[in-house]
Image (cartoon, rainbow, N blue to C red):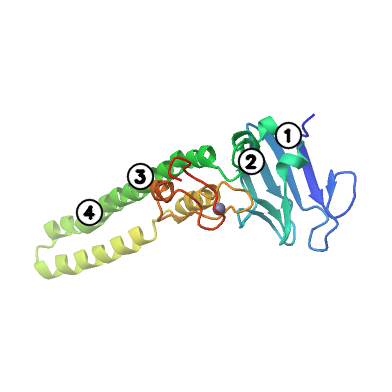
Amino acid sequence: MIEKSIVFGRTVSGENTVALQEPDISARHAKITFLGNDQFEVEDLGSTNGTYVNGYRVQKTTVNINDQVRLSSGTILDLVKIFGLKPSQTPNQELSKNNPKDFTVEFARLKPIYENYKRDRKKMILQHNQKTALIRTGITVLPLPVLFFFPGKPIYSALSLMGAGVANFVTGNMYNTDKLEELDEKFRLQYVCPNRECSMQLGTSNSWNLHFETGKCFRCGAIYNANKL
Ligand SMILES: [Zn+2]
């Protein structure tokens, strides 16, 4: 029987399904829900020392079975064990019959994550540039009608200079940093070494292909491409 939702905390209260008696664990620390298909929802319950996924502090996020979930500084949760998942439901054990270091299949799952991230980010920046170009043109040509009523170059020059200033100000403040940051953060959490004990970030500048060509994780030695080695 697989538990659906587990609350972790320091004290043994009715609600805490699992009590972790560590001084840096809050009374009610985090709640984790099994969503099926190797997915879990991790939610911090306003803990003092935080809940971390692959080293990043999170409030509420969806994680994969290969992600590292940590409470405070030192409590790493073994979700497979805690939720009583059968070996067949854990890809690590299922796929590494011959070599426990072989993460070829898990690593392949990161390819669409990398490609979608690059595509979405490019699209977001392109949209921003198109939008600001439009606004820029609009604001800069705004003084034109003034020229019609008050013919005279000096007034127009002064006004277009002002218009350009306003355009700079408006478009400079328009960048949707929240959305971009959200995208970056989600990517940082997902694009990590599939070996749960490592979970090293694979970096935004290193393409999936580069790691695939290298063949393995330089930190933990997890094999990314069994054909290569
Ligand atoms: Zn690694």
The percent position of residue 71, horizontal first and vertical second, equals 72, 55
**In percent of the image, x 56 and y 46: which residue is there?**
194
Mark nearer the N terminus (4 vs 1) = 1
Sequence-wise, the earlier of marks 2 and 4 is 2
Mark 3 residue element: helix
* Comes first in the chain, label 2 or label 3: 2
Q: Of the numbered discs in the image, which one, if any, rests on residue 85?
A: 1
- Between circles 4 and 3, the one closer to the viewer is 3
Disc 2 on helix, strand or loop?
loop
Q: Of the residues under marks 1 and 2, which one precedes in the sequence? A: 2
In the rendered structure, which amino acid carries the disc numbered 3?
Answer: Lys
Q: CA distance from mark 4 to mark 3?
A: 21 Å
- Between disc 2 and disc 3, the foreground one is 2
Q: Amino acid at mark 4?
A: Thr
Mark 3, residue position = 123
Mark 1 vs mark 3: give the one in front: 1
Taking the image as shown, residue 64 lies to the left or right of residue 19, namely left
Find the distance from the CA under tag 2 to the CA under tag 3.
30 Å
Distance Cα–Cα, label 1 vs label 3: 39 Å
Which residue is at 73% across, 49% downward? 77
**Residue 137 - label:** 4
Task: State which quarter of the image contains the N terminus.
Answer: top right
- Mark 1, ligand 1, within 8 Å: the answer is no
Q: Secondary structure at mark 4?
A: helix
From the viewer's perspective, is residue 164 above or below residue 89? Answer: below
Q: Nearer the viewer, residue 138 or 103?
A: 103
What amino acid is found at the position of numbered circle 1 in the picture?
Leu
Foreground residue, 3 or 45?
A: 3
Q: Which label was assigned to residue 165?
A: none
